Image (cartoon, rainbow, N blue to C red):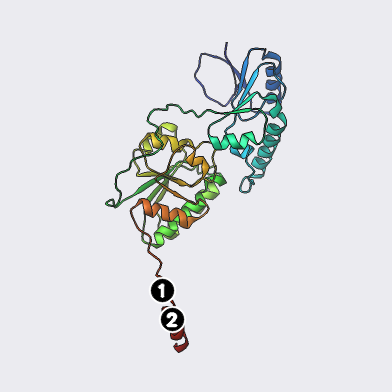
Amino acid sequence: MSILSLDSRMLLSTDKIVKRIQPTLVQRLFAEIWLAKNVALGDVALCFGNLPPLFKLRGYVVVFVQNRYLIDSVNLDGFSFKTKIRLKVERLWLSFRARNVNEFLVQTPSMQSLMQARTKAKVSVFPFVENPDGYVRKLHCSDTTEKRDFFFLYVASGEPHKNHLQLIEAWCLLATEGLFPTLTLTLNNMHFSELCFWIEHKIESHKLCVKNLGSLPHGEVKKLYSQVNALIYPSTFESFGLPLIEARQAGLPIIASELDYVRDVLDPEQSFDPDSSVSIARAVKRFMGLDEASLPLQDASRLVEYLLKRVED
């Protein structure tokens, strides 16, 4: 018999037995006590929300970890005070209760390495998506040099690691060169109002072709993959990066950060340093079939001529 113990806010259509938990500390504690009393020898307890059980259970305990902030040594600058506190508490919870876990599940080798450095428990890689059909590591792209209009998509929320600031700065650099590719974003205007306001200012000051559709249902996001030329993904770290998989399944070229989490799942058509707006802009230009100008190298005699001219001036 399967029993699902779920946050009351999670919508789910199932014929399984469901135990709903209100999102409060007291109700979460009651849920942990219920688990300790009801999980028996031979049972498998799957914890799908990153955190181990508070108490040692009699069954086989598997914890699915997908929040990289809990296992990676990155600072939390850019988050609200409340979110920082929550993440720090969850980091401690994971660290001190890892001994209650028989096996951790993650979705990429990078996450496996991070997790193995923090626990003696078994850590397994088990990447899964709604539908695995159509996924390939490398895409054979057609030539883009004859295209005039380019449409790029970034499917992401507005947390700091999603790196919208560097992405928009890259679009500003392209604008200074007279290049105005279209970029579509999926930012929630209410949850990330400050970021959205900053982006709107950049759009106005640099005449950028950037549009934000707001947060969309998953079905609407999947439709966008057929309406653009490429997915661009400047995130600085991910536990999996589901849009990368979905875009590849849709046959979409990908321009992404040159980081392990990307190479864990696919080979992008172009890559860049996510900390450099210049690098992002150059990757976009390469995808558009535009060459970077060569350095105007000179010999020593030209240097002397240059200096003498400065003296004459």
Q: What's the residue type where badge 2 is placed?
A: Tyr
In the rendered image, the vertical position of residue 274 relative to residue 248, given as above or below: below
The correct choice, above or below, for 46 with respect to 138 in the image is above
The tag earlier along the polypeptide, 1 or 2, is 1
x 51%, y 52%: residue: 165
> Picture coordinates of residue 230 (x, y %)?
37, 44
Q: Secondary structure at mark 1?
A: loop
Q: Position of residue 58 (x, y in %)?
A: 69, 16
Report the Cα–Cα distance between label 1 and label 2.
10 Å
Q: Which mark is residue 298?
A: 1
Q: Residue at x 72, y 31 (%)?
A: 96
Name the amino acid, label 1: Gln
* Residue drawn at 71 percent across, 35 percent down: 92
Residue that numbered label 2 is attached to: 306
Please, which residue is most extreme toward the front here?
A: 300
Residue at the left extreme, as displayed = 146
In the orientation shown, which residue stands out farthest toward the bottom?
312
Q: Is residue 311 left or right of residue 133?
A: right
Instruction: Specify the quadrant that holds the N terminus.
Output: top right
The outermost residue toward the top is 1
